[in-house]
């Protein structure tokens, strides 16, 4: 359960970082991550300089985590909303004693010659273009999940990272969590027997209706046309903006990509890199009476070569399987493993009793270790734990659940060519059309 300070960051309120919280972040980075290898420890002039693009709650939380590492500086922060940029500016000034530059246009960040990396924490529809252009400019990238709003954008991001030999980490921090790693290793050990079925669920009682506010003028401190960017031109509506953007198809994919990427990431880490063969999905807006678009209730069924995966989410409901509001259930012939943030549990198959029932506790916040891994890989030039090859795979599987829902089809997936082979409407949703004059280099469709 997040503390009051982290909840304030997520809700977008300005938060002053206290000395205690600053020490906790530093301690977490050291305890959860690995120290720099011998010979790579930063010296007095051995700095890593990052630029922040997207200064909302997630961006500021990531920024604080980066700055908890003493070798990191942030000379510039960027947001189309001057108030958000001002809050991020304060974070840097509070933690480093020097105020960074601010700007609205992300291209001013990418063109700077004094940056080693950029941190992209924008709404989803603005993930791809800054990442690709940063790779072209020779900068490494830490980009929040999911990679983008479409599979085609994710492929372009991966192609750019490979073409320019950049280190790129997707910000799904559970990939660096200790107890998640332990559970994955147990699954991969074969002790559960033949795993034939995996279920992921996210039941969120904190998500309620957001109302039906009228369209109006954007706030005066916001460059709204730049906020829309490659997304379709639409009148400003407060619900299609900060935080709630994720419930509209133009900008994001709802809970399927917001939470689904986190959980599906762990599943695929444990089960391997074989792609799904077919995907079906059903759901809709059965509870919420507002102007949001993405489903408040959804089930997606994936047929992988050796197992079936079910994703499900609900809002205004906080009790999932086994009284857990969210989690992952690996069902094998010898037993079952249940995993969430509190830890993981083994349940033996009753008629076999080949496994001893056991409970294992959770681990500290994994974000410091995830950031530390990225920083270390910037120096070693090795691939980070959530590199774009895997991040694109995970994001694509989540997107396929939405594509099946929106096309109302059982889709057959050609993973090699990244195409839906049996439904034209579904295949069109693999790509996205950018609003002129925006174009995305390396996008194939």
Image (cartoon, helix red, strand yellow):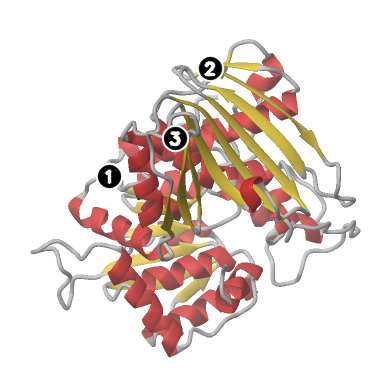
**Residue 313 image point, x, y percent:** 69, 43
Residue at the left extreme of this rendering:
39
In front: 355, or 419? 355
Q: Do the residues labelled 1 and 3 touch (CB within 8 Å)?
A: no
| Left or right relative to 295: residue 132 | left
- Give the CA distance from mark 1 to mark 3: 18 Å
Q: Mark 2 points at which residue?
A: 277
**Residue 248 image point, x, y percent:** 74, 46
The first of marks 1 and 3 along the sequence is: 3
**Residue 222 image point, x, y percent:** 69, 66
Q: Name the residue under label 1.
A: 383
Q: Mark 3 points at which residue?
A: 268
The first of marks 3 and 2 along the sequence is: 3
Residue 226 seen in render: yes
Q: Quadrant of residue 354?
A: top left
Q: Is mark 3 on a helix, strand or loop?
A: helix
- Give the CA distance from mark 2 to mark 1: 28 Å
The first of marks 2 and 1 along the sequence is: 2
Position of residue 285 relative to residue 4, above or below, is above
Position of residue 191 relative to residue 68, above or below, is above
């Amino acid at each position: 359960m997040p503390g009051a300070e982290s909840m304030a960051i997520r809700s977008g309120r300005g938060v002053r970082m206290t000395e205690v919280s600053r020490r906790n972040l530093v301690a977490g980075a050291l305890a959860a991550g690995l120290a720099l290898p011998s010979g790579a420890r930063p010296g007095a002039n051995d700095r890593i300089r990052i630029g922040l693009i997207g200064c909302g709650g997630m961006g500021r939380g990531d920024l604080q985590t980066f700055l908890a590492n003493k070798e990191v500086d942030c000379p510039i922060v960027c947001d189309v909303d001057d108030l958000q940029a001002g809050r991020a500016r304060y974070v840097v000034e509070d933690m480093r004693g020097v105020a960074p530059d601010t700007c609205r246009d992300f291209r001013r960040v990418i063109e700077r010659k004094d940056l080693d990396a950029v941190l992209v924490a924008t709404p989803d529809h603005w993930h791809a273009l800054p990442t690709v252009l940063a790779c072209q400019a020779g900068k490494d990238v830490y980009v929040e999940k999911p990679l983008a709003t479409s599979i085609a954008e994710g492929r372009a991001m991966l192609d750019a990272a490979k073409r320019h030999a950049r280190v790129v980490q997707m910000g799904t921090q559970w990939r660096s969590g200790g107890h998640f790693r332990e559970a994955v290793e147990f699954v991969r050990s074969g002790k559960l027997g033949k795993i034939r079925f995996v279920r992921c669920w996210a039941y969120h009682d904190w998500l309620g209706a957001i109302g039906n506010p009228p369209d109006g003028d954007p706030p005066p401190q916001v460059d709204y046309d730049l906020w829309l960017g490659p997304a379709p031109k639409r009148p400003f509506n407060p619900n299609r903006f900060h935080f709630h953007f994720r419930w509209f198809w133009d900008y994001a994919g709802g809970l399927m990509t917001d939470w689904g990427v986190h959980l599906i990431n762990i599943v695929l880490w444990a089960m391997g890199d074989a792609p799904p063969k077919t995907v079906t999905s059903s759901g809709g807006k059965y509870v919420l009476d507002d102007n949001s678009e993405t489903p408040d209730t959804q089930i997606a069924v994936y047929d992988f070569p050796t197992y079936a995966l079910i994703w499900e989410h609900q809002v205004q409901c906080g009790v999932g399987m086994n009284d857990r509001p969210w989690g992952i259930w690996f069902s094998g012939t010898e037993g079952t493993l249940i995993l969430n943030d509190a830890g993981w549990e083994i349940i033996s198959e009753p008629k076999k009793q080949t496994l001893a029932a056991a409970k294992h506790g959770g681990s500290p916040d994994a974000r410091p270790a995830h950031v530390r891994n990225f920083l270390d890989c910037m120096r070693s030039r090795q691939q980070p734990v959530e590199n774009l090859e895997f991040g694109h795979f995970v994001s694509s599987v989540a997107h396929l659940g939405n594509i099946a829902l929106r096309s109302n089809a059982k889709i057959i997936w050609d993973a090699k060519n990244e195409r839906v082979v049996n439904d034209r409407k579904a295949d069109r949703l693999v790509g996205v059309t950018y609003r002129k004059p925006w174009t995305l280099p390396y996008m194939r469709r």
